[in-house]
Amino acid sequence: LSDGHITGDIRSSAGLKGTVVTAEELFYNTPCRRRALKYPADEMNRIADVVIRYAIHNPTVSFTMRRCGSGNDFRTTGDGDQFKVIASLHGSNAAKNLISLDRDHQKLFYSLKGCMARPSASCTAPSLQSKQNRQKIFYLFINNRSVECAQLKQALDVVFAAQNTFSTFIMLSLQVGCAYRHRIILLSFTLFRSSENEADLCPFVIYTLYS
């Protein structure tokens, strides 16, 4: 491809099943972007972050990441076990006490799936250590696309702070209907307890949806 158009003829090539995309001369028309890339390690970390996000969001797909001339940095099995993917990519500590999230609202044309680490008291030693190390992970997908939403992340922090709790890992996948696809979606969350006898807070649910 060149400027979004196919150049040359399409021909068959032997290889393993799957799709291989090779990008060459990425900055031939934007040399200023090439000059901005100073440290290969930093760029590699950014690439790895994107691959990790999509690997967790798509546990049924096997992802492999490796650098040229070296072995695999990481690989997921693609067996559909999301908790296992999180444990392999972020370590067993991140995968401890994970809670599945599942919410569907037909009238408002959205559904929410994901998982989170069970909230713990913010004054415990593990929570304090996580805060000091800034080991708080938040992944958000809207219509299967990875996005950043500082407002939503801040809203979740406020909810947890009001309960004096802390969650080290949150992954949300929000599916929005066509009528809301090109609008700004604001979410309001609440926390609930699964039973009167259970002291630990259970996953939050969507309370209202505004557009």
Image (tube, rainbow, N blue to C red):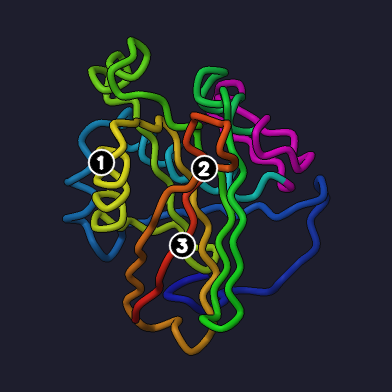
Residue appearing at x 24%, y 31% in the figure: 39
- The magenta segment is 60-84
- Give whichever of discs 3 and 1 has the lower sequence position: 1
Q: Are marks 2 and 1 in contact (CB under 8 Å)?
A: no
Indicate the secondary structure of the residue bearing disc 1: helix
- Rendered position, 12 above or below 201: below
Kindly report the distance in space between the C-alpha atoms of the residues bearing marks 3 and 1: 17 Å
Residue 129: % across, % down: 30, 13
Q: Amino acid at mark 1?
A: Ala
Indicate the secondary structure of the residue bearing disc 3: strand
Disc assigned to residue 162? 1
Left or right position of 124 against 150 = right
Residue appearing at x 47%, y 65% in the figure: 142
Indicate the secondary structure of the residue bearing disc 2: loop
Residue annotated with mark 2 = 193
Residue 79: % across, % down: 79, 39
Residue 99: % across, % down: 59, 38
Residue 182 sits in quarter: bottom left
Kindly report the distance in space between the C-alpha atoms of the residues bearing marks 2 and 1: 15 Å
137 or 40: which is nearer to us? Answer: 137
For this orientation, the residue located farthest to the top is 125
